[in-house]
Image (cartoon, grey):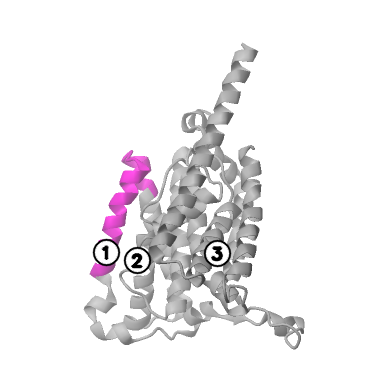
Amino acid sequence: MNRRASTYALPFFLALTFAFFCVFAPRFATSANLENLMAGYAFVAIVAIGQSFPILLKGIDLSIGAIVALAGIVTLDLSLIFHWPGLAVIPAVLVVAALAGAVNGLLIVYLRLQPFIATLATLAAYRGLVFLISGRQLFPELSTTPITDPWIVALDTYFDIGSALGVSDFIQLPGLPLSFVILVVLLIGFQVLLLATRFGRDLYAVGGNHEAARLAGIRTRRVTILAYTISGTCAGVAALLLVARLTTSTEALGNGMELTAISAAVIGGVSLQGGVGTAWGPVLGAFLLGVVLIGLTLLGVTQFVQQILTGAILLAAVCQSRLIAARQQRRTDAALVAGG
């Protein structure tokens, strides 16, 4: 099975897993649980999309969870300390997150740091910055003060699908979270960006062979910086959705999210070897993790076992990616020998 076929098999596996828990997990196939799945993992899927851009370049962004925390604290500070209106807070937060991502790209491009080292360093730096500027640290009373700005809390809106379709008297459909709608819009936009723009073609080329792309005239530095900027921006969007849902932000926001995002991206078919992947694969990977974790919770499986199974799923996805890459390399070598 080639890499593309394995990616297309993911929706089938997700549907099969969903059906399994619908049958065996109590209360899994309820409208409330479906709402929780869509709202609770939409922000994870958005972060996973952002993480896929560095991975497509054979890089990684370990700071993405820290950027989520930084964006969350900026939201809290601007709203509760400086009393900015939400209409101004939202773009300001996205700019901060985008700049944090761009810094990662600049460190990699101009200081020639390995992506792992660069983003590990910024992970620590951004986490420290979060505590430095945290309004919860400066003004302890803000720990119990919720964010009430209508523009921000509106991001946690739910749409009544049943009433809109006129079937609420016959069947109870789950509400459609605005966060899920935002995810779908971003998914379509980034998929078009990857497949129908010059930047997308350049991104795949640089990820496939950086030196060949440079010699072909592709501006590899710009592509790298933009990829990490997109990663940071997605973290900012996810932070806004999380803050809207929690009506606050903490210094621990986004802890461990980088590992979840990497897992979702790899499970979704984004190759750690670079140059292969889509925008929709990480979304399916994120919701597959969500279905598994929520289903296991409803089955009464402990969190420790859930972590083991999550690690096993990631390991299987990485092994499959490596096997497919090795098989393709053998075919390429065989074709070169036959042609020579």
Spot occupied by residue 329 in the image (x, y as percentages of width and height): 55, 27
Q: Which residue is at 44% across, 41% downward?
A: 221
The residue where tag 1 is placed is 129
Q: Are marks 1 and 2 in contact (CB under 8 Å)?
A: yes
Q: Residues within 10 Å of mark 2 (few under 14, many from 20)?
A: many
Q: Which residues are magenta?
A: 105-132
Give me the C-alpha separation between circle 1 and circle 3: 34 Å
Amino acid tagged 2: Leu
CA–CA distance between discs 3 and 2?
28 Å
The residue tagged 2 is 70
Please name the amino acid that badge 1 sits on.
Answer: Leu
- Quarter where residue 69 is shown: bottom left
* Whole-number angstrom distance, CA of label 1 to CA of label 2: 7 Å
Kindly give the residue lying farthest to the top in the view shown.
340
* Disc ID at residue 291: 3
Q: Examine the structure image and report whether residue 106 is included in the region drawn in magenta.
A: yes
The amino acid marked with disc number 3 is Val
Describe the element under mark 1 as helix, strand or loop. helix
Residue 274, given in percent of the width and then of the height, sits at: 50, 39
